[in-house]
């Protein structure tokens, strides 16, 4: 199914909302039940046929790389016991995926993190998953759904969107778009605003942490100016392409948990405990 084999994970951030836990433990390694957030994201990528995993990380996050490497001592200690089954999922990912890691030396925004991955991505389309946004689906994963949308519009970048309360639009990038004829969930994006005030938002369709990007995004990012905080925003770069008719938004089916907040993280653990 997949025409995209690479998925980039921006995982260099400090995770300060979860201090003091994240002083020594990467936020992406915090567990939902017994499985770390980052593993759910890689599983979603693999479900969509993406086997080359690029982690844009930092020197403080060696635990992420260690998680996706064999651990012969632990495997030996649980061999032929009921606990051996607990490693099946992660060992499957290690077998099926090729992992590469590149250091983001400065925290200069999501756009900068994505640009940092350019040497590993090369000149081909790729996906981006933000593991903070944990998505649960009964059928196809969010990335599988987005991949189908991309295959219909291969010249376009694809962003995942969901409807949020109007009072919360200031937390997100928000799209101004028009539904394609005959569709109830795919939009041609005309404009994108980063964290608008509710009275300025063109819609309540908020961008969440799933993207499919064409290689053209790298050239745009190289010319994107930092915002007032000194960060390069992927929304600003995508907006340049939206003006050319090269961005679509896909309103996905499924439930998203914002595990970048304590409330969302707790909700996710409660919800996954029932599956």
Image (cartoon, helix red, strand yellow):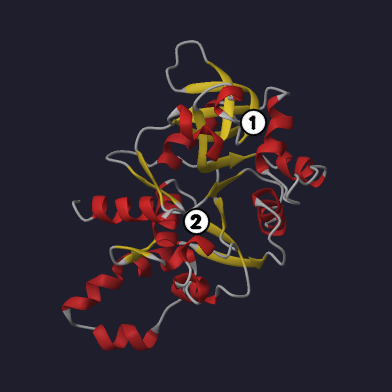
Residue 90: x percent and y percent?
36, 67
| Picture coordinates of residue 106, whole percent (x, y) | 72, 64
Question: Badge 2, how many Cα within 10 Å: few under 14, some, many 20+?
Answer: many
Label 1: state its secondary structure: strand
Mark 2 lies on a secondary structure that is loop
Q: Which mark is residue 176?
A: none
Q: Earlier in the sequence, mark 2 or mark 1?
A: 2
Taking the view exactly as shown, the residue that stands out farthest to the top is: 181
In terms of depth relative to the viewer, which is nearer, 81 or 210?
210
Judge the density around disc 1: few (<14), some (14-19), many (≥20) Cα neighbours within 10 Å. Answer: many
The nearer-to-camera label among 2 and 1 is 1
> What mark, if any, has residue 193 been given in the picture?
1
Q: Say above or below: 6 vs 95.
A: above
Q: Place residue 242 in its image quadrant.
A: top right
The structure residue drawn at horizontal position 45% and vertical position 16%, both measured from the top left corner, is 183
Q: Is residue 229 visible?
A: yes
Residue at image mark 2: 51
Position of the N terminus, as image quadrant, is top left
Place of residue 121 in the rendered image (x, y in percent of width and height, measured from the top left): 66, 53
Residue at figure coordinates x 57%, y 30% from the top left: 174
């Amino acid at each position: 199914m997949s025409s995209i084999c690479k998925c980039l994970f921006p995982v260099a951030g400090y995770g300060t909302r979860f201090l003091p836990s994240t002083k020594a433990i990467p936020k992406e390694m915090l567990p939902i039940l017994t499985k770390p957030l980052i593993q759910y994201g890689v599983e979603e990528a693999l479900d969509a046929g993406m086997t080359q995993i690029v982690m844009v990380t930092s020197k403080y996050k060696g635990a992420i790389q260690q998680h996706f490497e064999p651990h012969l001592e632990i495997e030996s200690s649980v061999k032929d016991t009921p606990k051996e089954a607990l490693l099946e999922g992660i060992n499957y990912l290690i077998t099926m995926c090729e992992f590469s890691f590149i250091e983001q030396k400065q925290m200069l925004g999501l756009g900068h993190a994505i640009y940092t991955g350019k040497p590993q991505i090369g000149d081909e389309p790729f996906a981006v998953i933000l593991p903070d946004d944990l998505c649960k689906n009964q059928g196809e994963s969010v990335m599988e759904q987005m991949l189908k949308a991309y295959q219909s519009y291969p010249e376009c970048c694809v962003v995942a969107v969901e409807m949020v309360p109007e009072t919360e639009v200031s937390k997100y990038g928000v799209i101004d778009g028009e539904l394609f004829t005959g569709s109830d969930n795919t939009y041609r994006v005309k404009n994108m605003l980063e964290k608008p005030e509710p009275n300025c938002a063109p819609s309540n369709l908020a961008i969440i942490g799933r993207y499919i990007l064409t290689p053209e995004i790298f050239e745009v990012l190289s010319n994107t100016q930092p915002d007032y905080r000194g960060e390069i925003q992927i929304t600003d770069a995508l907006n340049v392409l939206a003006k050319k008719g090269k961005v679509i938004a896909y309103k996905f089916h499924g439930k998203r948990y914002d595990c970048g907040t304590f409330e969302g993280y707790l909700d996710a653990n409660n919800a996954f405990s029932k599956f």
